[in-house]
Amino acid sequence: MNRSEYYNYIDEKLNVLAFRIDTRGKINLLDLHIHSETFFADLLNLLFGYNLKNLNAVKQNVEGIDLVDAENRLVVQVSATCTEQKIKSSLAKEMFSQYRGYRFKYISISKNADKLRLVDFSNPHTIVFDPNDDIIDIASILRIILNMSINKQKIMYGFIKDELGNDIDIVKVDSNLATIINILANENLGLEIESPKINAFQISNKIVFNDLVPVQDRIEEYKIYYSKLNEKYEEFDKQGANRSLPVFQVIKTQYTKLLPTGMESYELFYAIIDSVIGIISKSKNYIEIPYEELEMCVHIIVVDAFIRCKIFKNPEGYNHVITR
């Protein structure tokens, strides 16, 4: 199930980050602490619709406050320390007198904060603060993500993968693409498809025409692998096995099946990817690889099909070059 794949990936990455922050802090390596301020600002913005900014970009070393959202009247402290004394000390800072009417949130980035939510904290500057709602830790973030809709969960997964995912191994990509092409090429769906045609660098027009702007970053990210995938198709063709045609056949079939559902274009784009992943995962020939590697390869193949005009509508004047 895709939901479990997304959640398990997010859960692993956030908990590994928390563990590394904790262990590195014990030997006074604080680089992750510093970078975590901006990371958690972006994470909370995505999670709650905030507009948090890193205050240290404006004022260096402001005691008790790391992030500010003037629009939603929020001040946030991001800390690897999770003690009653730490929060009491923060609430006592004179800085809070400048933020009357703001809500204070405390983010524990490496420790569980359940016990602290039960504490009755003194609040000398009367800033808005409810320990039960305003003390956040990794576990509380994961609970929210677990109950998100599948589309929102996938967006969160993409963000976490971009921030905390592993570096891309081009050798693995090359090998995995070959395997996946072979699997998809063996799918017999009985559908005739015209010879593949390649987009003449008018991808942006097609994105806008199909209301795919929400996934434009994904298309831009993976279109750079067009040449790599084209090499694989050409390699197979030299062996007398036209692998591109049946691969396009599989992808177009998924598009055709899902189109009548009436989902938004960006949802349809992700649904095609999920459907192709499902076909590969169920294949008898599939040798399991890490999920993020599988998903990356399928993104490459689906984006390539989009570029070559196999899926989604083409705007007027959209140019093609016949290569096969």
Image: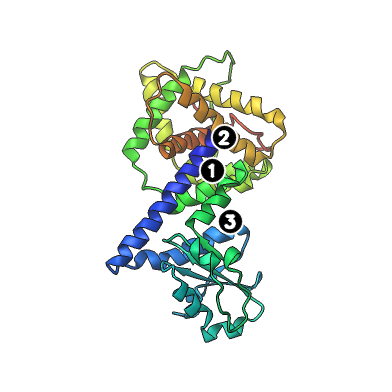
Mark 3 and mark 1: Cα distance apart in space: 23 Å
According to the image, label 3 marks what residue? 47
Is 254 placed left or right of 29 in the picture? right
- Number of residues whose C-alpha sits closer than 10 Å to that of mark 3, classed few (under 14), some (14–19) or many (20 or more): some
| Residue 69 appears in the figure | no
Picture coordinates of residue 288, whole percent (x, y): 38, 29
Picture coordinates of residue 24, whole percent (x, y): 31, 63
* Residue at the image position 44 percent from the left and 67 percent from the top: 82
| Quadrant of res 290 | top left
Look at label 2 and name its amino acid.
Answer: Phe
Which of the labelled discs sits on residue 219, or is there none?
1
- Of residues 217 and 270, which is closer to you in this image? 270
* Residue at the image position 60 percent from the left and 63 percent from the top: 133
Dot 1 lies on which element?
helix
Is residue 291 shown above or below 134? above
- Number of residues whose C-alpha sits closer than 10 Å to that of mark 2, classed few (under 14), some (14–19) or many (20 or more): many
Is residue 193 shown above or below 212? above
Mark 1 and mark 2: Cα distance apart in space: 9 Å
- Of residues 283 and 9, which is closer to you in this image? 9
Which of the labelled discs sits on residue 148, or is there none?
none
According to the image, label 2 marks what residue? 306
Is residue 268 shown above or below 283? below
| Quadrant of res 232 | top left
Look at label 3 and name its amino acid.
Answer: Leu
State yes or no: discs 1 and 2 in contact (Cβ < 8 Å).
Answer: yes
* Residue at the image position 46 percent from the left and 17 percent from the top: 186
Picture coordinates of residue 4, whole percent (x, y): 51, 38
State yes or no: discs 2 and 3 in contact (Cβ < 8 Å).
Answer: no
Which is nearer the N-term, disc 3 or disc 1?
Answer: 3
